[in-house]
Image (cartoon, helix red, strand yellow):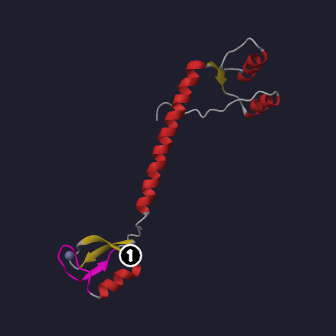
Amino acid sequence: MIKYILKCKNKHEFESWFSDSKEFDRLKNKNLIECIFCQTKKVDKSIMAPSVANSKLHNGQRQISKLKMKNFKKDLLKLRKFVEKNFEYVEQNFANKVREVYYDKNNKKNIYGKATQDEKEELKEEGIDLVNIPWVDKDN
Ligand SMILES: [Zn+2]
């Protein structure tokens, strides 16, 4: 399906759908196209509106993925809130604090913070796996 913007000799503009680009010419040759306002048969294609029928579908899909993103973000926010509530934030020396907690059997603290890629790899070599949490902003 192709949408054309049609224009009659009286400058009326209206949209019309055709099964393909040749259909317009075919119908016009048979005098089957007329202005929806003044019924003149002197109608021509105006600016081609190259919107194909399933562009609507694409918009729909875009909306779905936006919605998904929104829900995804909601879940991440929940996760963030959970971590903030149950874990202690370590602002500095996070990697060292992780080690402290890891090697101290009596330490059951849950901590979170930021580690550089190097720190993460060092910790991993020591057998400490950090869990990465995508940190989403609460607003926006
Ligand atoms: Zn007209």
**Residue at position x 76%, y 16% from top?**
100
**Residue at position x 61%, y 19% from top?**
87
The disc labelled 1 sits on which kind of residue? Ser
Observer-nearest of 104 and 116: 104
**Residue at position x 44%, y 50% from top?**
63
Rendering coords of residue 114 (x, y %): 67, 27
Q: Residue furthest left?
A: 38
Rendering coords of residue 73 (x, y %): 51, 37
Q: Residue furthest bottom?
A: 29
As displayed, is residue 137 above or below residue 45? Answer: above
Q: Is 81 positioned to the left or the right of 50 in the image?
A: right
Q: Secondary structure at mark 1?
A: loop
Q: Is 43 positioned to the left or the right of 69 in the image?
A: left
The residue at which mark 1 appears reads as 19
Using the rendered view, name the quadrant where residue 85 is placed: top right
Task: Tell whether circle 1 marks a residue whose Cβ is less than 8 angstroms from ligand 1.
Answer: no
Q: Is residue 107 magenta?
A: no
Ligand 1 shows up in the quarter that is bottom left
Work out which quarter of the rendered image holds the N terminus and state it: bottom left
Q: Main secondary structure of the magenta part?
A: loop
**Residue at position x 40%, y 66% from top?**
53
Q: Is 127 positioned to the left or the right of 94 in the image?
A: right
Report the label total. 1
As displayed, is residue 40 above or below residue 99? Answer: below
Rendering coords of residue 2 (x, y %): 39, 72
Using the rendered view, name the quadrant where residue 126 is placed: top right
Specify the segment rendered in magenta.
31-46
As displayed, is residue 24 above or below residue 126? Answer: below
Q: Is residue 32 magenta?
A: yes
